[in-house]
Image (tube, rainbow, N blue to C red):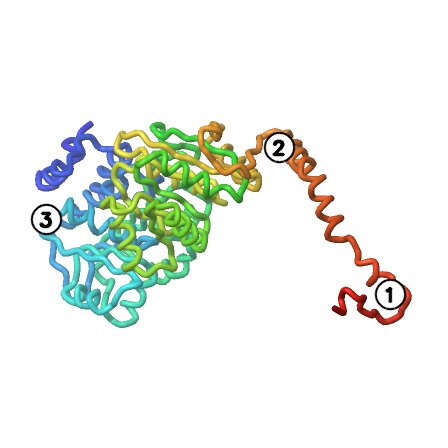
Amino acid sequence: MTFNSLGLTDSLLQAVQTTGYTIPTPIQERVIPEILNGKDVMAAAQTGTGKTAGFTLPLLQLLGGRKQTHDRQIRALVLTPTRELAAQIKDSIGTYGLNERLRHGVVFGGVNINPQKQKLRRGLDILVATPGRLLDLYQQHSVKFDEVEVLILDEADRMLDMGFIRDIRRILALLPKRRQNLMFSATFSNEIRKLAKTICHNPVEIDVSPRNSTVKLISQKMYRIDKPRKVDLLSSLLRSNADQTLVFSRTKHGANNLVKKLSRDNISAAAIHGNKSQAQRTKALDAFKQNKVQVLVATDIAARGIDIDQLATVINFDLPHVPEDYVHRIGRTGRAGLSGVAISLVTNEDKKQLRDIERLIKNSIPVADIAEFDLPARTQIFEESAGRSDSKHSSQEERQPANKENMRRRRKPNTNVTKQKSSGKPWKPSKSHAA
């Protein structure tokens, strides 16, 4: 199947052609006709499947050639969980809507609100927004929802994870009842289905991304290593491979520390997470896209919406607590038919997370040989079996004689002091002490 068979207009097909894409992805093939038919859609699709173009193209066609917006009114609303994803969708609308006479804009927090107010003053055909900033604008009477025809909720699962459900419900209460609703999520969890019932009307359910699927072109492997030497291994991995690499950290503090340690090893790196300002996040992402830094260290939430073409390698410095996040992470590589590599650094403390991930993907992640790297001698490699504890014991036993000798030296009493104290008499300095 080609884009020509999906019912898109010639102007949109020309825009698609300029991007170099000729064959629609499975999600695009299935959602575009349904959206063009005016149906509500509930689609499960993971990162890198082409879902953004899947709703952008038909949305542009639905709105094209219709009435113009009035002051502060919008015709289509796209809600996203993160600033990065909002900016990415806005760029996609600009790319595919190059030949369409539609006004579009994006609003999110972390930047000056006044230019966003100015943009909304004349009204927009399409507004991409994060929930918090949208409600701020509404409370300041800068946006109206009376003319909304289409609502799109992108990455609905992440919306729930980030605690946006209350904001979403407030926004829903402000929208017209008669509208087309499109929901996109990585998975169809019970929480997502419950939310869909309050938004969609008899939606067409499309699932091209089963929960246990990972991109087939991604080569997955893991290295087993003790926690204190993870940074040494990460540096060795990055030195042995000049490709740009996205590294996942579990925490914001951990991401900052990694950048500092990698920089000390002369590896250019930048961090992106929720505590960074919008300007800092944009600067870091642009530097990575422009090959000015080799490594981008990110948290799961900050990475949502990051769209990087031809990313060859993803490294999980920390395994995620939520197994589905592993699939989201490694889905950053292996896009557009290209191969990719996903590497995980696994410690003995990660046993539960690893077990949950392998259960989800229904496969065992191969263990790579760490011996090829020249790591400091203190690095302790542990095995998956019970032999891990045996090797730990032997390591302790080898150190035991020296440790006991040191303890004896530290504990060896001053006989003069001990005797005097035991007799209850005050201590008097000896001649040597008095000298």
Q: State yes or no: discs 3 and 1 in contact (Cβ < 8 Å).
A: no
First along the sequence among labels 2 and 3: 3
Q: Residue at x 22, y 69 (%)?
A: 114
Q: CB atoms at circles 2 and 1 under 8 Å apart?
A: no
Question: From the viewer's perspective, is residue 233 above or below residue 287?
Answer: above
> Marks 2/3: CA distance?
63 Å
Tell me the mark number nearer the camera, choosing from 3 and 1. 1
Q: Residue at x 50, y 33 (%)?
A: 358
Badge 1: few (under 14), some or many (20 or more) residues near its Cα, within 10 Å?
few
Look at label 2 and name its amino acid.
Answer: Arg
Residue 242 locus on image (x, y percent): 31, 36
- Can residue 300 be seen at all in this image of the molecule? no
The one of 252 and 35 positioned closer to us in this rendering: 252
**In this rendering, position of residue 217 left or right of residue 29:** right
Mark 3 crowd level (few <14, some 14–19, many ≥20, 10 Å Cα):
some
In percent of width and height, residue 94 lies at: 16, 49
Amino acid type at circle 3 is Glu
Q: Quadrant of the C terminus?
A: bottom right
Left or right of 104, for residue 225: right
- CB atoms at circles 2 and 3 under 8 Å apart? no
Gap in Å between the C-alphas at discs 2 and 1?
Answer: 50 Å
Against 233, residue 270 (above or below) is below
Residue that label 1 marks: 420
Reading the image, the residue beneath label 3 is: 100
Q: Please indicate, yes or no, whether residue 404 appears anywhere in the rendered image.
A: yes
Residue labelled with disc 2: 388
Q: Relative to 392, is 160 on the left or the right?
A: left
At numbered mark 3, what does the secondary structure look like: helix, strand or loop? loop
N-terminal-most mark, 3 or 1: 3
